[in-house]
Amino acid sequence: MITIADNINHFRKTVPPEVTLIAVSKRQNNEAIREAYEAGQLDFGENYVQELVSKQPLLPTEIRWHFIGHLQSNKVKYIAPFVYMIHSVDSISLMREINKQAQKHGRQIPVLLEIFIATEESKSGMSMADLDAFFAEYRAEEFPGVSICGVMGMASYTENQGMVRNEFKKLKQIFDHLKNNFFTDNENFAQISMGMSSDYGIAIDEGSNMVRIGTAIFGQRL
Ligand SMILES: *Cc1c(COP(=O)(O)O)cnc(C)c1O
């Protein structure tokens, strides 16, 4: 039988060293997370605030919790004390709330801007128009509690690999555009979070340096 530890070891060997492997543990139990942790995995991704907040105190404090699901402003306060990175910032108002809650805890929280790149069905994230509006308002000095570290996106759920590849190319182009226009001298702006169990190979080809893998590590979710 293939264990979670086997899968972690497999991904360690498969994913290039400069790519961060995030084990997406939503709807997986704490034993499963612990098994991955004991195999050396430190970065974990969760989608739901309530689930994350109930798991976090029962698991090793060394774990780096990435929040990758849709985040409502009124829930930021629950994860602000400990979250390692938020991948799903999709508005300036959410940024303001993260900034406020981070400062309450004397923290600066790393975040990624979630960009809408899918063509097939609607997925969350900012459109180009939303991004323009965001940067029309954004002034780094007003957000000492937040550090924008890059972008995140999800490709269409499709068998069409060419479509998936084009969507990842688009996210890489948007990253380059933002880097050149707003973050030239900011070395923190360096992360491209793209790729899941079904498409991480294509994502890495197209410049991903953070992959978010769930079922290929843990098996089917509950
Ligand atoms: C669930 C989820 C993943 C992992 O998906 P798998 O197909 O299980 O690898 C990655 N990213 C996000 C945003 C998710 O919600």
Image: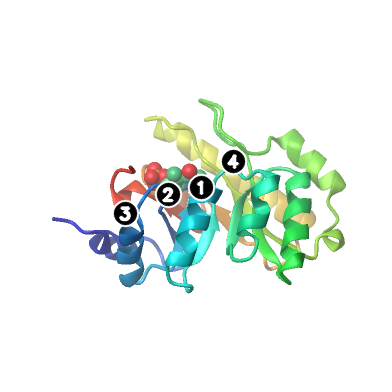
How far is disc 3 from disc 1 in space, using C-alphas? 16 Å
Measured as percent of width and height from the top left, residue 193 is found at: 54, 53
Residue at image position (70%, 70%) is 107
Q: Please tell me which of labels 1 and 4 falls first in the chain.
A: 1
Do tag 3 and tag 1 residues touch (Cβ < 8 Å)? Answer: no
Measured as percent of width and height from the top left, residue 24 is found at: 42, 53
Quarter where residue 34 is shown: bottom left
How far is disc 2 from disc 1 in space, using C-alphas? 6 Å
How far is disc 2 from disc 4 in space, using C-alphas? 27 Å
Residue at image position (30%, 43%) is 220
- Nearest-to-viewer mark from 1 and 4: 1
Q: Please tell me which of labels 2 and 3 falls first in the chain.
A: 2
**Ligand 1 neighbours mark 3 (CB distance < 8 Å):** yes
Q: Please tell me which of labels 4 and 3 falls first in the chain.
A: 4
Q: Residues within 10 Å of mark 4 (few under 14, many from 20)?
A: some
**Ligand 1 neighbours mark 1 (CB distance < 8 Å):** yes
Residue 34, compared with residue 2, is above or below; it is below
Measured as percent of width and height from the top left, residue 214 is found at: 38, 49
Q: How is the image coloured?
A: rainbow
Q: Please tell me which of labels 2 and 1 falls first in the chain.
A: 2
Which residue bears the numbered disc 4?
A: 170
Which residue bears the numbered disc 1?
A: 47
The amino acid beneath tag 3 is: Ile
**Residue 26 got which mark?**
2
Foreground of the two, 28 or 219: 28
